Image (tube, helix red, strand yellow):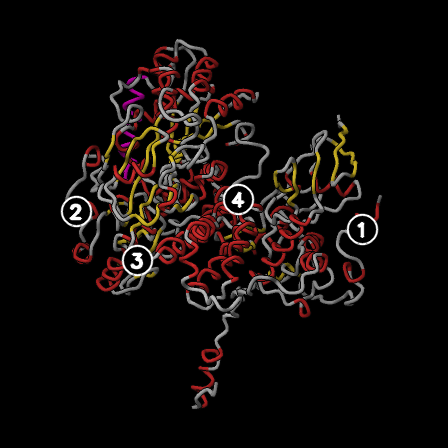
Amino acid sequence: MSEKVKFTIDGKECVAERGQNLVDAAADNGVYIPSLCHLRDVIPAGSCRICNIKNAGRIMTACTTPVEQGMEIENDISELNDMRKAIVEMLFVEGNHFCPACEKSGNCELQALAYRFQMMVPRYPYEFPIKTPDTQDSRLWIERNRCIKCKRCIRTIKTEDGKNIFAFQERGHKVEINIDHELAAGLSEEKIQEATDNCPVGSILKKGTGFSQPIGTRRFDKEAIGSDIEKVV
Amino acid sequence: MGKSVKSICEEYNNDATRLMDILLEIQCKNGHIPDEAIEEVAKTLNISKVDVIQTLSFYHFFTRDNIGDYTVYLNNSAVADMMGRADVAEAFEKEAGCKFESLSEDGKIGLYSTSCIGMSDQEPAAIINGKVFTKLDPYKVKDLVLDMKAGKTIDEMVEKYGDGHNASDLVKSMVFNNIRKKGPVLFSDYETGTSLKKVTGMTPDEVVGIVKDSYLRGRGGAGFPVGLKWDFCRRTQSEETYLMCNADEGEPGTFKERVLLTEKPKLVFEGMAVAGYALDAKQGILYLRYEYKYLKNYLESVLNEMREANLLGKNILGKEGFDFDIRIQFGAGAYVCGEETALIESCEGKRGEPRNRPPFPVQKGYMDEPTVVNNVESLCSVVRIIEKGADWFTMMGSRESAGTKLLSISGDCKYQGVYEIEWGMRIRDIIEMVGAEDVKAIQVGGPSGTLISPRDFKRTICFEDLPTGGSMIIIGHNRNLLRDIVLNFTEFFIEESCGSCTVCRANTVILKDKLLKIMSGKAGKEEIDELKNWTKFNKMANRCGLGQTAANPILTSIENFREEYEKHVKMDEDFDTGFDLASAVEESCDYVGRKPNL
């Protein structure tokens, strides 16, 4: 059934299945389109807006754009990279991200993107908002200071009969992640681990374990985020 | 609680997509939605508790806490401020004995702010227990609070009714229509059913063809051609198609749909039925903002009347297989639900978060079926286009904007109200028409539109020049633009953002903080351009129109009123850290009893 189509990203010729989303299609062709909320094989959220690319002069999120024959995509251009860096900076100032004290440091995708875009200090003033972590659950810890509202947990972690464990509450700049404690109690250990692993930052953490992987040996300690994709082809 | 939560859920077939209606009923009957009810709803609908809380906490008029026997929602829009809201708010606080956003000690009176309630032509206005109270002043507030303390019913508190159907038994509201100029399309005489009769003799394609030929563009603001939208929808193969009428007018300064729904509801519903015929849709939904809930009984009775006249229902006007009916879906206080995909989400019982496109609603909308969402005014225009023909319609207006447009005009002018004008009217002529003098600026198209200066008064209202969904706020010379307009609008966008896209959620707050810094006199001259530069990310990196236009108040005011910013900044400094050492050490100095030596 699958139909292969040809398209280009910054002039590089790529081939993918028609209708596949651009972030994954690019990755399969060795092109890294930076993203934060996207996860392969999960319905895209299109909410962090970091994967914005230019298609026929229009800016759109790559994770929600299906590949079509003959597309000419612009990705690694200064206009977009400055916007991506700005978004990363916005995420830093709207939350409370103290990397040295965070369990996720080195495995954190937000931190890794900040390094990739060579963020020294955000252009925006810090807001230092007051957020309340939810530590009520016996196995999970929701650290709202670090949440970037990517919805990965909402989209991926459900009960066996498909009910939501995570959801948003409130709206606008007050929006935060809420957890259904009753339903979370029924999650398997694997699901708990998955929730922790899927979180791009240190916002969902498994209790009873910490720093099991030493700092310095972690995913982004030695290689920039996206370099694994860029090495493939 | 009177009715049990269970029976309310049952009324809606325990259907989780009707969560909005269920929560509305609980809120209405109970005054708030207690935790037990949340649990019960989740259990009955077989969804998780956090899903219920997700929807509940998204909408302004759903509350988990008690908000009083009398709940005052006082509009805090820029126009309300211009018309004296501050004094009214102060009077409410003094008389009720509590501050805004809180409940009086005895739990009787709750005072809360709310975004524009569609009464800009009669501000300051408030919604109290679902009833609208307009043109408030401190004396009226005193009387109202006395009435509350005496335990009067809300109906007893309305002393005088407004004009037209506002005074009818089913409305009994003090709202006035303020129709200032009747045009040929929306406010001229029309015999209900004429167009519906006409379409039954045509094929759906012919109906779509006429609407396409009329070049009618969506009246909600975006201006997408109505006929084209219908055409796209017809091309999607599906068993079921839905037609929605967007009556969520939340753009501050807009109130024309309130007037259409009050005086021309049959025109609106007939427009929906015509669209239903063209799209082969069986079900229409009128998504009505909560603020207009006072029209509910009246609109329901109009629907019944039309059903009895066989203008709705089965085999409409004898046409075999032409079945179409309408239900009213209420919102619960969220500007973003005026965005068509957020509106659809809301109709499905979810938080009003705009969807990603593709797919577009015409491909996959309500319940994943092809759906057309049209504005109230657009659908009214459709009826007249069918009646009189596309040529009649295109004779009016400008090159790219056919027909007439309803404007809601408020602010510093003599004749605030609704005007039906032909597209292409000059701003200067509009100013004269509404009796405004000494105009400093005009906000065209509401906060998401443009703040124009007298340099632009020669321009015209139309899609090819100054487009508008209908809101027009006249700003007089004595107004402080940054404080009264730009800051208010920016705060509005912060309050109404759904919070999904990073830039809309975070950047709008950043922009407001910078604006406040400039207004406080603690900014250097480079910071105006810095602020302007930061606004560009809103347009670039947001999913929906709210996020994309949330920086417009700041952007267009810097472009057209830069001097207002320059007044505040230190022209001899490029940048100011905004750090004040004296105030930073004040507390510690106080504590140790020293004076700072700076």
Q: Nearer the viewer, mark 2 or mark 4?
A: 2
**Does the magenta-highlighted stretch encompass residue B553?**
no
The chain letter for the residue carrying disc 1 is: A
Q: Which mark is residue B156?
A: 2
Residue A71, position in %: x, y? 70, 33
Taking depth in this image into account, of B435 and B214 the one nearest to the observer is B435
Magenta range is: B293-310
Query: A86 above or below B468?
Result: below
Mark 2 and mark 4: Cα distance apart in space: 41 Å
Residue visible at 29% across and 61% down in the picture: B107
Question: Residue A228's mark?
Answer: 1
Residue visible at 56% across and 62% down? A124
Question: For the stretch drawn in magenta, what is the main secondary structure?
Answer: helix
Cβ–Cβ under 8 Å for marks 2 and 3: no
Disc 4 residue crowd, few under 14, some 14–19, many 20+, Cα 10 Å: some
Q: Which mark is residue B360?
A: none
Answer above or below: position of B476 versus A58. below
Residue mark closest to the camera, 3 vs 1: 1
Sequence-first tag of 2 and 3: 3
- Select label 1 or label 2 by which is in front: 1
Q: Chain of mark 3?
A: B
Which kind of residue does numbered mark 2 sit on? Glu
Dot 1, crowdedness within 10 Å: few (<14), some or many (≥20)?
A: few
Q: Secondary structure at mark 3?
A: strand
Question: Tag 2, which secondary structure?
Answer: helix
* Three-letter residue code for mark 4: Ile
Q: Which residue is mark 3?
A: B111
Circle number at residue B47: 4
